[in-house]
Image (tube, grey):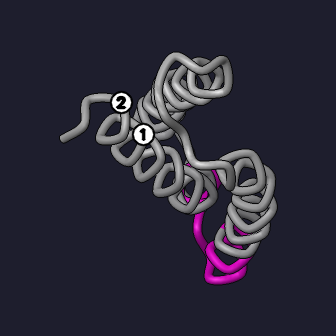
Amino acid sequence: MKLMTPFDFMAPALEASQIMAESQMVIGMRLAGMAGLWPMAKSETDRMLAEKLSAGMDSAHAALRTGMAGGNLSDMAMAAMKPVRAKTRANAKRLQRNVTGG
């Protein structure tokens, strides 16, 4: 087993930072939409809840699969964040298009 160094956690830390930034953008745009500052689909609140469950399950499954395949902690963290990042990135892009009209 390879000894891990702090550098092994740089990629997961960057990925987590990107997830945090995109999540804050999505939360802000959704709250502003709910407040009536711009048009937002009525299904957005249902979507908020449903996507968290699916992303969480996909995340746990990916981390477990990576760990069972012999991946180290950094690999497992990246695998676990991949489905979450996909959701935050897609939501941020979709909501930005709704806000800007583009």
Instruction: Label 2: state its secondary structure.
Output: helix
At horizontal 42% and vertical 53% (from top left) the residue drawn is 90
Going by the image, does 74 lie left or right of 54? left
The residue type indicated by label 2 comes to Val
Q: Quick check: 11 left or right of 43?
A: left
Residue at the spot 72% in from the left edge and 48% down from the top edge = 48
Q: Position of residue 44 (x, y in %)?
A: 65, 48
Mark 2: give few (<14), some (14-19) or many (20+) Cα within 10 Å.
Answer: some
Disc number placed over residue 95 in the picture, else none:
1
Task: Tell me how far mark 1 sits from mark 2, CA to CA.
Answer: 6 Å
The secondary structure that most of the magenta stretch takes on is helix
Circle 1 or circle 2, nearest the eye: 2
Residue 31 placement (x, y as % from top left): 65, 22
Q: Nearer the viewer, residue 93 or 40?
A: 40
**Quarter of the figure that contains the N terminus:** bottom right
Q: Is residue 2 above or below residue 29?
A: below
Looking at the image, which is closer to me, 12 or 48? Answer: 48
Picture residue at 81% right of the left edge, 61% below the top: 53
Q: Is residue 46 above or below residue 66?
A: above
Provide the residue span drawn in magenta. 63-76
The residue labelled by disc 2 is 99
* Residue 5 appearing in the image: no
Q: Quadrant of residue 52?
A: bottom right
